[in-house]
């Protein structure tokens, strides 16, 4: 059984809901799942998982959340090579630039993404829910 983590930061609950849907997809595919907020996750935990889904909404000028998520990401990024990784998040404005930049940074760092990222505008609708579940299943 694949040991998988879902790690997210959410201000409004939209990305948190996406994280729950990702976890549902993982569970449906038979993975053991642990859910963490960005503040709870660290490099020691990163070492113990086969696959990790990271979720962060767009903040400010289309960037990752800078106080909790970005520092956590910076600390675990070097531990992610060779693991199955997926990205997701919500936004309230813009066009997804923060996610395209994050994906590109992953690829440039040698991180292999298990599937395409999932984004949604505001709260996840049924289409986003299914996309999140599919993202979870792709990690197994």
Image: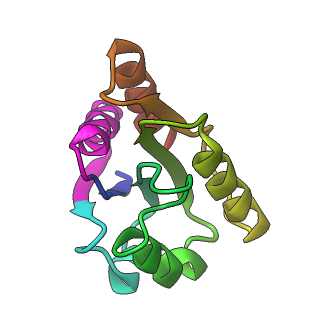
Q: Position of residue 79 (x, y in %)?
A: 54, 79
Is residue 43 visible in this depiction of the protein? yes
85 falls in the magenta region: no
Q: Which residues are magenta?
A: 11-35
Colour mapping: rainbow
- Residue occupying the far right of the picture: 108
Give whichever of 118, 26 is nearer the camera.
118
Rendered residue at 48%/79% (across/down): 76
Q: Position of residue 32 (x, y in %)?
A: 26, 51
31 falls in the magenta region: yes
Horizontally, residue 33 falls left or right of residue 128, namely: left
Q: Is residue 136 above or below residue 129?
A: below
Q: Is residue 46 above or below residue 129?
A: below
Is residue 140 visible in this depiction of the protein? no
Rendered residue at 43%/71% (across/down): 66
Q: Position of residue 109 (x, y in %)?
A: 73, 71
């Amino acid at each position: 059984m694949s040991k998988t983590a879902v790690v997210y930061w959410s201000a409004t609950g939209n990305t948190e809901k996406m994280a729950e849907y990702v976890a549902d997809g993982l569970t449906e595919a038979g993975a053991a799942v642990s859910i963490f907020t960005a503040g709870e996750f660290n490099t020691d935990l990163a070492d113990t998982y086969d696959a990790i889904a990271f979720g962060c909404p767009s903040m400010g000028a289309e960037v990752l959340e800078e106080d909790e998520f970005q520092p956590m990401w910076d600390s675990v990024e070097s531990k992610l090579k060779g693991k199955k990784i997926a990205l997701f998040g919500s936004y309230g404005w813009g066009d997804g630039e923060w996610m395209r930049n994050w994906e590109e940074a992953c690829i440039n760092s040698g991180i292999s993404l298990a599937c395409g990222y999932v984004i949604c505008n505001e709260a996840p609708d049924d289409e986003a829910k299914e996309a999140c579940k599919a993202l979870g299943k792709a990690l197994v």
